[in-house]
Amino acid sequence: MIALKHESNPLGNPVKVLHLEDSDADHLLVKRALEGSDLRFSIARADDKQSLLASLLDQEFDIVLMDYRLPGFTAMDAWAELSKLSATPPCVIVSGAIGEAAAVAAIQSGITDYLHKDNLKELARVILRALKLHQSENERQRTANALEESERRISELARHLQSSLEQERAAISREIHDEIGGALAAMNLDVAWIKRHTESPAILERLSAIQQMVGQALTATQRIMQNTRPAILDQGLAASVQWLSEAHSKRVGRRVLLNCRLDNETALNDGARLTAYRVVQESLTNIGKYAPAADVLIDIADGGEGLTVEVSDNGPGFDMTRLQKTAGFGLKGLSERAKNIGGWLDVSSTPGRGTSITLTLPLQPPQPIRQHQKIHDPSRFVR
């Protein structure tokens, strides 16, 4: 007997072998080679393609040994049929000289191994190796499937959390508007009434100070509402992005050129509209933080079947490797938000040449068209 050192049967049970061979003598040689090894096995034989498939459908086999050339077909033809099965066992070609090119093509097609008939003493070792490779591939596939399922669930959770977050933001925005905003507006009216009914310079001075603080609180309330759930989105993406660009320009004192070509804004659902708004908002926030002296170009178009939103600046830019090393939760959150509705986010930057953030989203089927005029001429934008 041949001792198979450092080899063990990964299945534990006797290996069920199916041998595709038309020669009685060659089948007997294979059987004797296995009997002369430490491998525990059972073996069945098929001599044509029909009996091969019938045997596989009748019972499960752990491995298939195949001669390369058989009457009317080859091992590659048999493998093509085996590959259609829901659970394909590993296959090893046991044949005479078939040529190196044919052996390589067989391995590349998915056949596990090849053994020359003159080297049958190694057959048990080759079988065990094929079984281990097959088991490793199955485990890898199970791991990949589990990872894919985990990613799917994480994506669904992220989508649910994002939806819940936006709903909560909308509720908070309404609360601020109805309760705090209403109270501040009423207070402002009361202060104005008192001012009209008093002539005391000291009281008037104090009332003016109160009015100023109330005005500041109202401004802060409006800003918080816009950041939480922008009501201006109800007027459309073009109007809301124009409001963002004007607010940024006033805040940093730099140009923001907006080129908006939305011929079919009705095809944008709430998720797409809000995602586009958040991308522009986050981009302008980053520009105000890291490149406040930069001019900005915002280009929005819904040509073809997708919406494209690009925010670019002529600021200092940065090395893209920094994006991988830092947390970047803002951009990562936007990227995940875009992914959840079938889009994607691309960030590109070069030191000394500015930064560009591009969002691409799919559109719904065409809706009645509503025209929007170009808001700014992008030809005036100078990098």
Image (cartoon, rainbow, N blue to C red):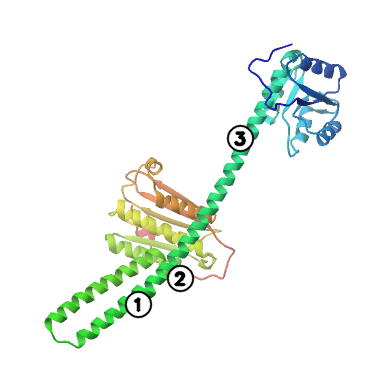
Q: Residue furthest right?
A: 24
Q: Nearer the viewer, residue 254 or 335?
A: 335
Residue at 49% x, 54% y: name it.
Answer: 338
Q: Which residue is mark 1?
A: 182
Other residues around mark 1 within 10 Å, as few (<14) / some (14–19) / many (≥20): some
**Image disc number at residue 140:** 3
**Where does residue 354 sit, x and y in percent of width and height?**
35, 48
Residue at 59% x, 42% y: name it.
Answer: 146
Disc on the earlier residue, 1 or 2: 1
Amino acid on which the number 2 mark rests in the picture? Asp
In the image, residue 255 sits, relative to residue 98, either above or below, namely below
Amino acid on which the number 1 mark rests in the picture? Gly
Q: Nearer the viewer, mark 3 or mark 2?
A: 3
**Image disc number at residue 234:** 2
In the image, residue 248 sits, relative to residue 9, either above or below, namely below
Q: Nearer the viewer, residue 301 or 176?
A: 176
**Where does residue 365 sit, x and y in percent of width and height?**
59, 63
Could you tell me how far apart the alpha carbons at marks 3 and 2 are, in whole angstroms?
49 Å
Q: Which element is circle 1 on?
A: helix
Determine whether label 1 and label 3 are within 8 Å by CB. no
Q: Which element is circle 2 on?
A: helix
- Residue 109 falls left or right of residue 187: right
**Where does residue 226 sit, x and y in percent of width and height?**
38, 66
- Residue 359 falls left or right of residue 381: right
